[in-house]
Amino acid sequence: MSFPRSEGQIPIYYNSFNTGRPQAAGAASGYVSGYIDLDGTPRYPFGYGLSYTEFAYSNLQLDQRVLRGDEKISVTLDVTNTGRRAGEEIVQLYLHDRVASVVRPVRELKDFRKIRLEPGQTQTLHFVIDRETLSFYNAQLHWGAEAGQFDLMIGASAADIRLRTTFELAPTGSAGTHSMLHTQGTRWVQADGTPIALKGVNLGNWLLPEFWMMGYGENAKVNDQCTLEAVLDQRFGVAQRQRLIQLHRDHWITPRDWDLIPQFGLNLVRLPFLWSVVEDENQPRHLRADAWHYLDQAIEQARARGLYVILDLHGAVGAQGTEHHSGCAGKNLYWSTPEYQERTDWLWRQIAARYKDEPVVAGYDLLNEPWGSSAEQLAEVVKKLYTSIREVDAKHIILLPDHPKGIAAYGNPRAQGMRNVAFETHPYPGFFGWAKPGMPVHRDWLGCLPEGGGVCDWQKRMAALDTPLYIGEFQPWADLEPELSGQITRASFDRYAQLGWASTAWSYKKFSRAGGDAPVNWGLVTNAKGAALPEIDFEKASLSEIEAFFKLFGSIPYQVNTPVMKWMNSAIAPQPFQAK
């Protein structure tokens, strides 16, 4: 049972339905369901118990992500006694049906295991999920399971969820249940017009290297793709360079990473890629032989885990800015070279033609931070790209990037004949000259302080344009006390979702030399403490040393940002900005 804090909470139970106005971080307290003078949570939640030791949960694995027909999903995880005494633990498996024909509980206990472990002992537990596990009585009192997405939660109680992931039950004869997304007013919605809360993360340093994410300093001699290619070409030849780049890509993101992403409560990834991932660098306007290898791979991995994908041209040919993350630091030749603009137009036509009917793709991010131009030129070029894509693909959302001087140069998209678009911005409260990291800067941004500022200013602009917003990059957890970092991360995602905006934090993974906790770690995942990452000098290291360095990415032990994972999966939204 769930034991209440006060008789005024009765009835209280763990498998309740969601309210029409659930608590959400950043929302005004007068417009949510809750108590003025009492926490809405039970004193002792369902499944709660004490022990003389502690247990760690890890390595949650599903043997498949889409359940079809009479198949079964095998679920395994490891539980370790991390204390100094033997003890017993009841490991509980909960499920949540995201969308059904009748209202479903926020969580339902479906299975459990009671185990006893000696100090330091680890046991692998096994659960099985089939259609019967997912079945319920519908409005006609028929017993059965309905296709859709499900949240799977493993924990020590209904309020102490340690691991989380997602899977799909496919309709008969269907490969999946992703809906083709589109915009409606100021919101992102599914095919049937139902709003969708898109919360995600960027897969930085995968298909376009950013060397600071591999432990290198800002002044490293090799700090962008162009420099790396030049050094490796000169030392080992083009063929070996291409092979080394492939090693980096094959090991930076692997199935273990795809498995971890939904465990953070996320359902979206932004995929930054370099133009030459698709276009042959030696034959302009020709596809590489393996042009679709990595984009297809990302889409299939996402499909299997119930994730959506935004395709982000992070580095255009010629570079659309001076920053290293455009691929070639200091170049910014895109805007002054019509040939590069025409090739980018060609590139997006190829991408749109391939994925025009793909529902896993949530949208096309035309140019990342294209700030090497004037606002007027940016708007002109983006409108041309929009027109070219629409000649091939009328379905997908197209993202209009903002400029340091704002979005006014675009005018009203609808008045310009642009449909199914969203504006994109990259707010970084606490960084890049915007105050300093801490609770106040996030409070002001999310809470519209000073009055009418922060997200409310963007909300007003989007309402006037009747267009949604996409927060393409933001960083809510770095350089904060761990518990506060998790709470502000959840509060940020919740606030954006409340406004109808999609959002993707930067970034999923960042490594350091020594590994372990670091205040300014921009990754949800890093290398574990003691799992050192060597500093390779690409101008001097041997071929085998560079190979080993890139291969290490796929096997190095991880340390997960546990406060963020905890709060992103919490049944109760945090309130980090309330006065203590």
Image (tube, helix red, strand yellow):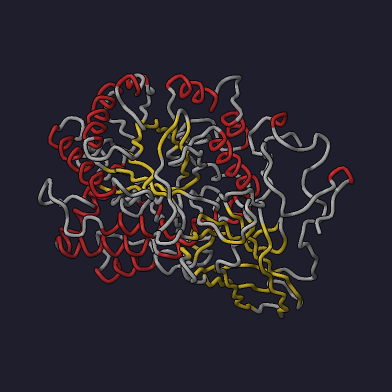
Residue 173 lies in quadrant = bottom left
Residue 199 at x, y = what percent? 50, 45
Q: Which sits in the foreground, 29 or 527?
A: 29
Residue 534 at x, y = what percent? 39, 64
Residue under the point 57% across and 20% down: 452
Image: 559 above or below 347: below
Is residue 576 visible to us here?
Answer: no
Residue 569 at x, y = what percent? 61, 52
Residue 352 at x, y = what percent? 25, 44
Q: Quadrant of the C terminus?
A: top right
Is residue 305 visible to us here?
Answer: yes
Image: 307 above or below 250: above
Image: 271 above or below 74: above
Image position of 532 (left or right of 113): left
Residue 252 lies in quadrant = bottom left
Image position of 578 (left or right of 418): right
Q: Quadrant of the N terminus?
A: bottom right
Image: 375 above or below 104: above
Residue under the point 72% across and 29% down: 30
Image position of 155 (left or right of 470): right
Which residue, as the protein is rendered here, is positioned at the far right?
7
